[in-house]
Amino acid sequence: MNSDLLLVLGITVGAFSIPAVISAFSDSRPPRAAAIAIVVSGSLILTAFVTKPGGYTAHQIPEVFARVIAELVH
């Protein structure tokens, strides 16, 4: 599997889990689905860092997003 795609999916799932956590806490219910999403997100990001030789830097992340979107569009 493409490590760039794993990184983008992990960051996207993590970003979507933040509103789920806030919603669960504001409704006084346990954030089960949000916790699962955070674990999945962390696993995807960790797998991307481990499978990419040399890992990623913070400056590469926007380039990775652009590259993955370009691959999906083309």
Image (tube, helix red, strand yellow):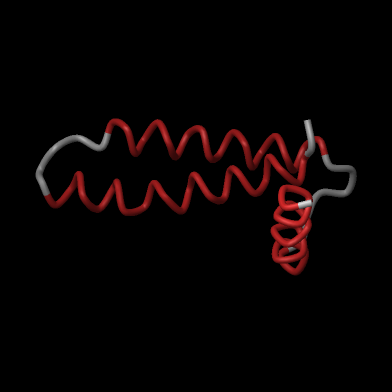
Residue drawn at point x = 44 percent, y = 39 percent = 38
Identify which residue, 42 or 1, lies in the foreground: 1
Residue 24 found in image quarter = top left
In the displayed structure, 29 sits above or below 62; it is above
Residue drawn at point x = 46 percent, y = 53 percent = 15
In the displayed structure, 34 sits above or below 54; it is above
Residue furthest to the left? 28
**Image spot of residue 36 (x, y percent):** 40, 31
Residue drawn at point x = 28 percent, y = 31 percent = 32
**Image spot of residue 19 (x, y percent):** 31, 53
In the displayed structure, 34 sits above or below 59; it is above
In the displayed structure, 44 sits above or below 57; it is above
Identify which residue, 12 or 55, lies in the foreground: 12
Query: Left or right: 46 with respect to 3?
Result: left
Residue 2 found in image quarter = top right
Residue drawn at point x = 34 percent, y = 39 percent = 34
**Image spot of residue 53 (x, y percent):** 89, 43
For the N terminus, which image quadrant? top right
Number of numbered discs overlaid on the protein picture: 0
Query: Left or right: 20 with respect to 65?
Result: left
Residue 31 found in image quarter = top left
Residue furthest to the bottom? 59
**Image spot of residue 51 (x, y percent):** 81, 35
Residue furthest to the right? 53
Query: Left or right: 55 with respect to 19?
Result: right
Identify which residue, 2 or 42, lies in the foreground: 2
